[in-house]
């Protein structure tokens, strides 16, 4: 199936991940459940989250770069079944709060059910697109996400919203897939490769330029060692690992920048995928 317009892409992605939430489609990126230890989670973290929260949908561990502290407020974009949100809730403790946002009603239902079963009270899950999260301005100490922003057809809007939600001094902690070199059309135009966290990946240079233009400081993108072997397992034979890798994306909102007219606005769309990588 070839790529479509933004609304059609969102619909395809929503349907794909809703099916996973209902148990009708195996996870995840690339169509196979990721071994969470391979992407950076400890056995202790894996045992701490509610059963059913870890759907194997990640490409990294944003907890490892978020440096969460007790009492902080965290927004998790594309929270899925709630796995990272529950780990974050544990880190910020009873005086902190975690807000998970997902555009799939089935995922939100699953995450809320997991919270109820686990008795976690400092986390809530909201229905909304990550380009338009239903979260107020300047409420978050940390905005995190795990292998989700690559799925968005409007990445500038996602990162602009992350900037808006962060308090001055707040931190961005993203695990995502990035493009290493331009993809052939059979991958770049394949909606199944987009839903599989490959075709929508942006280049490293492209992302650095975007985040800097929005106003983020201390922008760093670090490739995850060994991630290409994990990506190779998503769709054996398709050679996705030649074109993308997992990365840690971190940045901060400067203390001196405020919301509104002082925030730089990015262009409506990034440059073509891979042009800056």
Image (cartoon, rainbow, N blue to C red):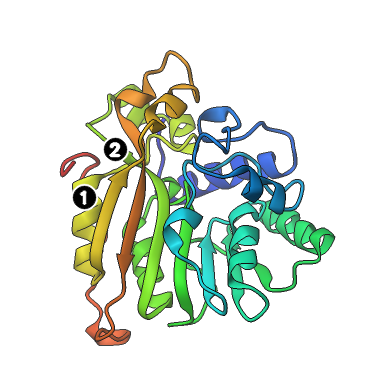
Which residue is found at the position 81% from the left and 66% from the top? 119
Q: Secondary structure at mark 2?
A: strand
Q: CA distance from mark 1 to mark 2?
A: 10 Å
Q: Position of residue 257 (x, y in %)?
A: 26, 84
Q: Secondary structure at mark 1?
A: helix
Q: Position of residue 13 (x, y in %)?
A: 53, 44
Q: Position of residue 25 (x, y in %)?
A: 68, 32
> In which image quadrant can residue 34 be found?
top right
The reply, left or right, for residue 233 in relation to residue 36 is: left
Q: Position of residue 21 (x, y in %)?
A: 70, 44
Front-lying residue, 13 or 56: 56
Front-lying residue, 200 or 207: 207
Up/down of 249 relative to 40, above or below? below
- Find out whether the residues at labels 1 and 2 contact each other: C-beta distance under 8 Å: yes
Q: Which mark is residue 206?
A: 1
Which residue is found at the position 74% from the left and 57% from the top? 109
Which residue is found at the position 74% from the left and 72% from the top? 121
The reply, left or right, for residue 149 in relation to residue 50 is: left
Q: Which residue is mark 2?
A: 179
């Amino acid at each position: 199936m070839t790529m479509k317009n933004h609304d059609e892409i969102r619909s395809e992605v929503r349907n794909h991940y809703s099916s996973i939430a209902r148990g009708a489609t195996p996870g995840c990126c690339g169509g196979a459940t990721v071994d969470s230890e391979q992407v950076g989670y400890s056995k202790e973290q894996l045992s701490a989250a509610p059963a059913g929260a870890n759907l194997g949908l990640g490409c990294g561990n944003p907890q490892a770069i978020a440096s969460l502290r007790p009492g902080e407020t965290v927004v998790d974009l594309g929270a899925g079944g709630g796995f990272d949100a529950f780990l974050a809730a544990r880190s910020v403790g009873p005086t902190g709060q975690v807000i998970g946002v997902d555009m799939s009603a089935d995922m939100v239902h699953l995450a809320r059910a997991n919270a109820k079963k686990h008795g976690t009270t400092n986390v809530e899950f909201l229905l909304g697109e990550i380009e338009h999260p239903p979260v107020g301005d300047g409420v978050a100490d940390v905005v995190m996400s795990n292998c989700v922003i690559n799925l968005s057809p409007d990445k500038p809007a996602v990162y602009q919203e992350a900037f808006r939600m962060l308090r001055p001094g707040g931190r961005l902690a993203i695990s995502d897939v990035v493009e290493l070199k331009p993809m052939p059309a059979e991958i770049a135009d394949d909606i199944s490769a987009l839903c599989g966290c490959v075709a929508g990946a942006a280049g490293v240079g492209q992302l650095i330029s975007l985040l800097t233009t929005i106003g983020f400081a201390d922008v760093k993108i670090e490739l995850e060692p060994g991630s290409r072997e994990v990506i190779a397992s998503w769709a054996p034979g398709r050679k996705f690992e030649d074109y993308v890798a997992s990365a840690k994306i971190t940045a901060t909102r400067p203390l001196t920048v405020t919301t509104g007219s002082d925030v730089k606005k990015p262009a409506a769309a990034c440059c073509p995928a891979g042009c800056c990588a």
